[in-house]
Amino acid sequence: MFIFFVPETNYMGSKERKTREKEELKALILKAARKLFVEKGIGQTTIRNIADSIDYSIGTVYVYFRDKNEILHALHTQGFVDLGGQLKVLFNVTDPMERLKAMGKVYINYGLDYPEMYDLMFTLKAPIEFLEAIQKDEWDEGKASFDVLRTTAKQCMDAGHFKGHKLEPLCFLIWSCMHGMCSLQIGSRTQNANIKNAENIVADAYDEFLKILNIL
Amino acid sequence: MFIFFVPETNYMGSKERKTREKEELKALILKAARKLFVEKGIGQTTIRNIADSIDYSIGTVYVYFRDKNEILHALHTQGFVDLGGQLKVLFNVTDPMERLKAMGKVYINYGLDYPEMYDLMFTLKAPIEFLEAIQKDEWDEGKASFDVLRTTAKQCMDAGHFKGHKLEPLCFLIWSCMHGMCSLQIGSRTQNANIKNAENIVADAYDEFLKILNIL
DNA sequence: AAAGAAAATGAACATTGTTCATTTTTCCAA
DNA sequence: TTGGAAAAATGAACAATGTTCATTTTCTTT
């Protein structure tokens, strides 16, 4: 009894520790990758860079991630946890119309503050290609974030706003507005296009967005 | 006199022909590049592919273009000539509000019909990086297209629309709306995000956009 | 302490953008 | 017509990158 019990406990214990250590290393790789992406851009960050920065070999990275797209997808998911968390906090705001406005601001700030993460989440094909590669055609994080918008817009409608509008397309239009501003700004399409006051154009356009919301 | 005249004529003639031939080959390279980009995507098209498809060597491509970014920028410019031309045709529509609506439709159709060209024009960093590389911080084609929008929106204001709105930020907001829809659709962000009727979401959202324009 | 399992390694490969010395072609003058 | 210079075209070679996998190292259990 004793003879069997002790070894088995040790085995299970180390097995669990191993699992934890593996998760820790996986997290370490992601943390390093994210840091490099933010610092020097996704396109300029190589697997070697990531491995070097945490003093592991290239091969080790490939033990924990099948390819670069899986790393990008994992960070893509992290980004949605971050942004989604910030959006969910806004349910503190009881008036749905005010909440909707606040959501727009949070979304824009996230995009402009973390452009590389934003690109990963909403522009780059890589994380989507990973989903296709593993035959998963669901995008859970995107779903969740869009649900937050849909729920809020629905409450706006219930409160008498958006008369004559369809919920789903209107939500997508609002999302497109916010995304479009972030995307054009991040992609440097505002800088050289002869737009006046280009540095503040997103903030100014957001004000126009608010004016329109106020009459809907 | 005669002795000098004849050779000089020959020289100038062949010189001009040479110039023309160089331009033709440059155009041929761009045509091949564009074809491959549209067929298999920009990321999947290599310089070797382009060279092979027109039976020239890799080196020749580099005689005519300093690097891949220059090719991307040249096609980026072509795209703006195309789209800009389609937009300018709409000045046939005299009512500025109707013209604005039509411009949105043309823009969206272009984006959805030629997603790779659209990415090149409004999303990818490469053509912008080329501008930076050659120390040019003007983006003539972008300017011209935005001018078309600005002019039309200004006429809308003069006709009594958009009261209380600022021209420049409102134009950017409208552009962002259209761009956002194209960008999310092209980037496959609508497909798996639990959006109902995802195939038609852009068209449906455009209808919501029209409803809003009608009250502004 | 030894054997077996798990983890880490980095050399090696394929692909890409890019360069540049060399070759081929074109052109003009004698 | 032809020789040589100018122009154009070439493709071998290089550096960087993602990726694989046979080998080495480390850890775990008995």
Image (tube, coloured by chain):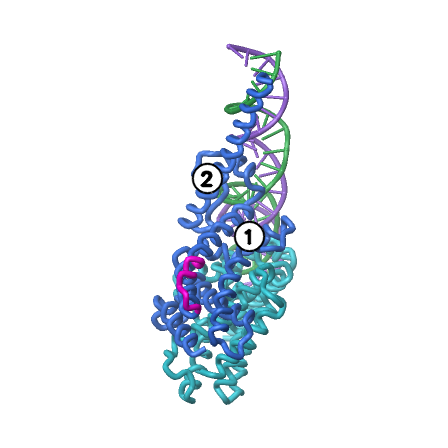
Chain colours: A cyan, B blue, C green, D purple
The residue under label 2 is B28
**Residue B95 within the magenta-colored segment of the rendering:** yes
User: Residue B154 location in percent, x, y?
Assistant: 51, 69
Q: Specify whether residue B62 is in view.
A: yes
User: Does B171 sit left or right of B95 as displayed?
Assistant: right
Amino acid at the residue labelled 1: Pro
Badge 2 marks a residue whose secondary structure is helix
- Disc marking residue A168: none
Figure check: C21 above or below B92: above
Q: Nearer the viewer, residue D30 or A44?
A: A44
Q: Nearer the viewer, residue A49 or A86?
A: A86
Q: Nearer the viewer, residue A49 or B151?
A: B151
Q: Tell me the distance, in whole angstroms, between the alpha carbons under discs 1 and 2.
A: 19 Å
Badge 1 marks a residue whose secondary structure is helix
User: Residue B147 location in percent, x, y?
Assistant: 52, 61
Looking at the figure, which quarter contains the C terminus of chain A? Answer: bottom left
- The stretch in magenta equals B87-96
The residue under label 1 is B127
Figure check: A152 above or below C8: below
Instruction: Determine the chain carrying the residue at label 1.
Output: B
